[in-house]
């Protein structure tokens, strides 16, 4: 609700974060040549990651072959670090293109990687409009970052 009700009149949050040199504070886990992996600050589930293009674009159209390849490679990397640190039973991976399709930031396309566990849904979102996240986001960041560093050595 903090994001939904908050002021969104500024520039693109993804463009702002990638231009800054504050990766831990901004929850950026990895920077590739064309894209980066960032944790969702308002996650659907613990460990919710996103792969985001460095350049501001709302579509997949006009991407170079290198951009397309790296986008999926970083999605795979995100899945792998989540497997190594959180042991999920599965994943939801997807792109919401356009506001009517559920994109919270429709002007800058991004791919969601949401780890899932059997039985991870409960009554809280239905009755209390609340999601239960069992670990502080900074603690999760540190675990994922350590796994990433071990993976790319």
Image (spheres, rainbow, N blue to C red):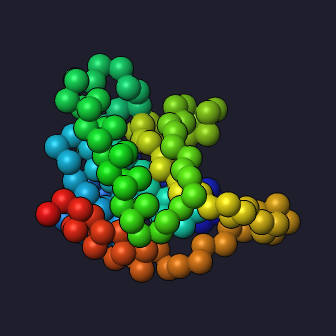
Residue nearest the observer in this picture, 143 or 104: 143
The answer to whether residue 19 is left or right of residue 92 is left
Instruction: Classify 24 as above or below 56.
Output: below
Q: Which residue lies furthest to the left in this view?
A: 153
Front-lying residue, 135 or 40: 135
- Residue shown at the point (49%, 59%) measured from the top left: 48
Instruction: Report whether 137 appears left or right of 65.
Output: right
Q: What is the x, y in percent for residue 1?
A: 65, 63
In the image: residue 81, left or right of residue 4: left
- Where in the figure is residue 60, as x and y percent of width and height? 38, 26
Residue farthest to the top, as pictured: 62
* Front residue (pair 68, 128): 68
Q: Which residue is drawn at 29% across and 29% down?
A: 68
What's the residue at 22%, 23% (across, down)? 64
114 relative to 26, above or below: above
Q: Quadrant of the C terminus?
A: bottom left
Tell me how many marks there are.
0
Quadrant assignment, res 17: bottom left
Horizontal and vertical percent position of residue 88:
53, 61
In the image, residue 34 above or below residue 27: above
Image point 44% across, 56% down: which residue? 49
Q: In this view of the protein, can residue 143 be seen by the observer? A: yes
Task: Place residue 131 in its image quadrant.
Answer: bottom right
């Amino acid at each position: 609700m903090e994001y939904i009700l908050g002021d969104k009149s500024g520039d693109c949050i993804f463009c702002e974060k990638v231009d800054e040199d504050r990766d831990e504070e901004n929850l950026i886990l990895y920077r590739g040549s064309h894209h980066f992996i960032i944790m969702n600050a308002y996650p659907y589930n613990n460990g919710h990651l996103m792969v985001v293009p460095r350049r501001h674009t709302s579509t997949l159209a006009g991407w170079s072959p290198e951009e397309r390849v790296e986008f999926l490679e970083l999605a795979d990397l995100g899945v792998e670090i989540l497997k190594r640190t959180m042991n999920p039973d599965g994943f939801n991976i997807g792109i919401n293109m356009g506001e009517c399709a559920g994109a919270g930031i429709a002007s800058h396309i991004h791919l969601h990687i949401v780890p899932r566990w059997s039985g991870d849904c409960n009554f809280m979102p239905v009755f209390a409009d609340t999601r239960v996240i069992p670990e502080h986001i900074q603690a999760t960041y540190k675990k994922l970052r350590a796994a990433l560093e071990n993976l790319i050595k």
